[in-house]
Amino acid sequence: MIFELAGGLGIFLLGMKHMSDGMQAVAGNSLRRLVGAVTNHRVFATTVGIIVTCIVQSSSITTVMVVGFVNSGVMNLSQAVGVIMGANIGTTITGWILVLKIGKYGLPLLGFAAFMYLFTRNDRWRYWAMFVMGIGMVFFGLEVMKDACSIIKEMPDFEAWFARFQADTYVGVLKCALVGCVLTTLVQSSSATLGITISLATQGVISYPTAAALILGENLGTTITAFLASLGTTTNAKRAAYFHVIFNLIGVFWITLIFQWYIQLIQGIVGVDVAESVLIDGKETYPNTVAAIAATHSVFNVCNTLLFMPFLTPIVRFLERIIPSLSYKEKPRLTDLDIRILETPLLAIEQSRKEILKMGDGCLKMLDWHLELMQADEPNKQLGDRLRQRERVLDSVQDEVAAFITNLLSGNVSHATAEEGRRQLRLADEYESISDYIVNLDKFDRKLRRDGFRFTDSQRADLESLNRHVKTYTHDIHEALSASNPNILTSTDASGKRIRDQVKALRRKHLEELSAGTIPPVVSVAFMAALNAYIRVRDHARNIAETIALEK
């Protein structure tokens, strides 16, 4: 019995993971846009939470992801509480999937989907096959667990132990809810305890009221995942996790007060007799219990959300009061990347993309600052320090992005996500290299000033013109990266050649001026080095354009 129960539970959980991975890969960009569109509007945020949780098939993944977003500053607390409430509703989809009476078809579904997954070359079809394979595993795992639980009825000692947990009194309801909470806390998955609860209930080992009380406890137990994820995070992330705990704690408290009326209401809504049994393979089972359990789960979370919805603003204020902000900067990292987001690779790769876009913005600012420094008659120490500090920041950002993407690629990600990750590693390196050459440009100018020299008026005018052209070229490519425009290599080819021709012309002009013997050697060396630095900035910008255009 133990072996069958463990094996069935393992297959069930693996099926849930395959369903989640398959749906995430199929949803793709839609999932990214959905999370990016979250606003302070509580109904919309709740709807997003429902849809995202239906896609990822786990409220724990959604809430941990939300804690990660709040921790990184991508999402504020008002948005987070709405998404968390939606996640609690979305997780009930698992129960309704199990209501489908296709348990005996779980193994054929698993088999046919496995063949498609193994032998098709189309990525999209493979992920659909993974999703269907997950459904098959969920139902097959549930059937195995049901068979294991049916043995309990033949063992008087086990049955007597389960009979001690009856939700026929208020204390009994609390006792059952506590068991559900502890079990979910231990296995860190409400889906696992839901599968076990349904298996026990359909075999008649526990009654429907007991199963309903266990479900309430499972709602409470699932909050531990987000709570653990909030340890060591920012104040706002802690507030989001604590809201999840408060939301479920208050919900379970008020529903237990009216529990007997509540389960009667559910039976009326479902319209089936949960006590009605049928013989399947000579064994007495209670198939109607599954629909009642799914309805218990859904109605509870919907009612709890409707109850909380009007009070979100005062609840947010209450959380801000009991968990006050700290007086110092809480975020030790330079980027908004958070390891918790790695649970959803598609959203993680989008977050790292945003950080790379910020690197590009930083490089463009550095070109503007360098132009201002070069034009100034007197050295601007404050602006020069800011330029060099920005280069050091971009070095650290590249390190954080590289570590984040490496962690992402070490997991089980789709081919498209892996390709995007490798492209982003190259982009981060190119932007960091651009920042290095811009700082070198400033070094040449500062060294000349320190030695009592300056570029000639003609040289400064030429370098300023070149700086503007390089800035425009880099800006156009950066905008193309932001808009994911694959045609950028063709559209900027002419301007890139003009920059190269301009540099060649300036070198020829400089060599002609050298023959007149009016330019000090130190100025000559600095000017040629500056021209080389600009052409290297242009080359790295072109590498970015090639990466956008998916060329090697």
Image: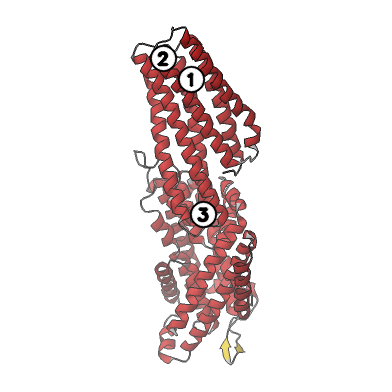
Q: CA distance from mark 1 to mark 3?
A: 40 Å
Q: Is residue 93 above or below residue 31?
A: below
Measured as percent of width and height from the top left, residue 423 is found at: 53, 45
Q: CA distance from mark 1 to mark 2?
A: 18 Å
Disc 2 marks a residue whose amino acid type is: Val
The reply to whether discs 2 and 3 touch (Cβ–Cβ < 8 Å) is no
* Lower sequence index among marks 1 and 3: 3
Label 1, on which residue? 371
Asked which secondary structure carries label 1, the reply is helix
- Residue 523: image tag: 2
Disc 1 marks a residue whose amino acid type is: Leu
Disc 3 marks a residue whose amino acid type is: Pro
Q: Quadrant of residue 271?
A: bottom right
Q: Is residue 407 visible?
A: yes
Q: Residue at x 49, y 14 (%)?
A: 511
Asked which secondary structure carries label 2, the reply is helix
Q: Residue at x 45, y 46 (%)?
A: 337
Q: CA distance from mark 2 to mark 3?
A: 51 Å
**Category of crowding for the residue at label 3, using alpha-carbon neighbours closer than 10 angstroms: few (below 14), some (14–19), many (at least 20):** many
